[in-house]
Image: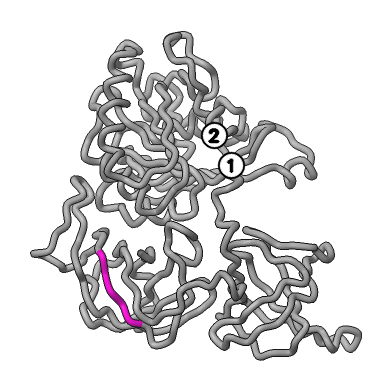
Amino acid sequence: MTQFSNNSYLDMELLRFSTAGSVDDGKSTLIGRLLYDSKSIFEDQLEAVKRASIKKGTEHLNLALFTDGLRAEREQGITIDVAYRYFATPKRKFIIADTPGHIQYTRNMVTGASTANAGLVLIDARNGITEQTCRHSYISSLLKIPHLIFCINKMDLVNYSEEVYKQITETFTVFAEKLDLRDIRFVPISALFGDNVVDRSTNMPWYTGGTLLEELETVEIDHDNDFTSPRFPVQYVIRPESTEYHDYRGYAGRVAGGVFAKGDQVTVLPSGLTSTIKTIDTYTGELDEAYPPLSVTIQLTDDIDISRGDMIVKADNMPRVTQDLEVMMCWMNARPLQLNGKYIVKHTTREVRCVVKEIQYKVNVNNLEQITDDTTVRLNDIARVVIRCTKPLFVDSYKQNRITGALILIDEGTNETVGVAMVE
């Protein structure tokens, strides 16, 4: 197990990444190999997996068992739910979301990938680009994952062929022109034997790029957040009971975009009232400025009415204030989306009610075609939907800001999360 001091670990940069790929492409095996070869497995975990591997009669250590935690997953050899794993190297700490490949678990993939800085898409070298590859690439594009690493897996089963690798990368590059993908990388690997996962492969001397771990350690994520449009959704109003701080009124939350500094002129939505930032406080003391994803408390020079769900912005860079939204919706409930149905919308810290006004089309995520003759949105479907809210929301496009451009739909009766949406 890799050892770190408390201070060094806390100061390290965090990368969140998700996995995607067809069934049996080796997602769970790859994550297991990454954890095993980077020495991020506890001894008791290793012993348990060794015993389980022997019981199943597998030739090799079954690395997939490090992530497939549900009994049904272990018995069927598939990933059903999102499995989160944590590890660190001397350069960076990581949170892995191992997501399912089955089409019926699309909602699970969306959940795991929604907060990812990077996505790993696995491709079986024997099969090349499949419908599932296109499907997962489209969803990754829809979720605006900034960096995608395509792992051409099972290279051992094609004799580590450079020609096979080149054919797959060239085919996908043509398809990727249809998608909004910012940063694409390719790594030929064998998750089973560890080629180019953590250690460089001697079987593929023709590949001169970095190993998968090197790519994960060096991918630039500093500019993935929106630092241009100041957005501060108010989560809580702090009014201490202590007489020592009886005049204190602070607005707590997490910076969703841009940079706020002491002395900045700000506007509060929806009231439109203006004020100046007096202090930016944290549990360790004051800051001169705050930026994503810091959680802070902002004091203003004026005592104005602000409550949870309001948003502090700058007058020269306003979000769109609207009750009508066109969104790309991923439906996550067994009951279909109801046209003219009433739902609760949760957007940042704001909660309002809405009505579904129009279902414009569904997307066939295997070929990206728009379906207009059947607009019944069922579980795992993705559709373009128009909703009208009872009160205005303060939104940006999801492409600009993945926080202020995202929202969820909640069933009023059951309080279930039934849909997630991205503002167009």
What label does residue 94 carry, if any? 1
**Which residue occupies the foreground of this view, 159 or 44?**
159
Q: Earlier in the sequence, mark 1 or mark 2?
A: 1
Where residue 159 appears, x then y in whole percent? 32, 11
The N terminus lies in which quarter of the figure?
top right
Residue at 62% x, 35% y is: 42
Where residue 236 appears, x then y in whole percent? 65, 79
10 Å crowding of disc 1: few (<14), some (14-19), many (20+): some
Where residue 359 appears, x then y in whole percent? 21, 71
The span picked out in magenta is 384-388
Q: Which colour scheme is used?
A: one colour
Give yes or no for contact between labels 1 and 2 (Cβ–Cβ under 8 Å).
yes
| Residue assigned mark 2 | 216
**Which residue occupies the foreground of this view, 423 or 351?**
423
Q: Is residue 68 visible?
A: no
10 Å crowding of disc 2: few (<14), some (14-19), many (20+): many
The C terminus lies in which quarter of the figure?
bottom left
